Image (tube, grey):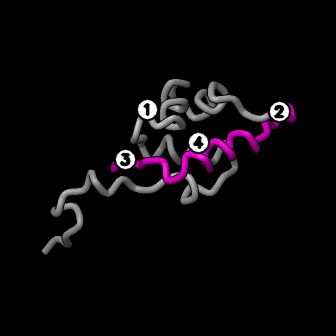
């Protein structure tokens, strides 16, 4: 599985600020997103600040889903991790 990177940190921060938890009308916290996504709060915080550049597709998709945000608005495939053999068709 190839890693993803944040496309727009401001959009990610805005999605967090605008999100509402189901049981309350307060925005999600970094910790609540991390817990729901099954990752550490350090991972979520670090991708928001840029301290961590990459995250798995699975975690990225969970974060977008929790924040009720469009995945493609928040994350992009990190093409720098591809080698030429990854993009060539098998003969």
Check the image and report above or below for 77 versus 34.
Answer: below
Pick whichever of labels 2 and 1 is earlier in the sequence. 2
In the picture, the quarter occupied by the C terminus is bottom left
Residue that label 4 marks? 63
Residue that label 1 marks? 51
- Badge 2 element: loop
Q: What is the CA distance from the residue labelled 3 to the residue labelled 2? A: 30 Å
Q: What is the CA distance from the residue labelled 4 to the residue labelled 3? A: 14 Å
Residue that label 3 marks? 3
Span highlighted in magenta in the image: 1-26
Q: What is the CA distance from the residue labelled 1 to the residue labelled 4? A: 17 Å
Q: Percent position (x, y) of residue 51? A: 43, 32
Q: Residues within 10 Å of mark 4 (few under 14, many from 20)?
A: many
- Badge 1 element: loop
- Badge 3 element: loop
Pick whichever of labels 1 and 4 is earlier in the sequence. 1
Magenta stretch: includes residue 10: yes
Check the image and report above or below for 45 versus 15.
Answer: above
Q: Percent position (x, y) of residue 33? A: 63, 33
Q: Residue at x 77, y 35 (%)?
A: 27
Q: Nearer the viewer, mark 3 or mark 1?
A: 1
Q: Nearer the viewer, mark 1 or mark 4?
A: 1
Q: Nearer the viewer, mark 2 or mark 1?
A: 1
Q: Could you tell whether 75 is left or right of 22 in the image?
A: left
* Residue extending furthest toward the left: 91
Residue that label 2 marks? 26
Q: Residue at x 54, y 51 (%)?
A: 8
């Amino acid at each position: 599985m190839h890693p993803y990177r944040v496309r727009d940190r401001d959009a990610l921060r805005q999605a967090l600020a605008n999100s509402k938890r189901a049981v309350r009308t307060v925005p999600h916290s970094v910790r609540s997103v991390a817990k729901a996504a099954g990752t550490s709060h350090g991972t979520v915080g670090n991708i928001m600040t840029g301290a961590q550049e990459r995250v798995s597709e699975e975690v990225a998709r969970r974060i977008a889903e929790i924040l009720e945000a469009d995945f493609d608005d928040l994350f992009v495939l990190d093409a720098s991790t591809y080698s030429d053999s990854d993009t060539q068709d098998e003969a």
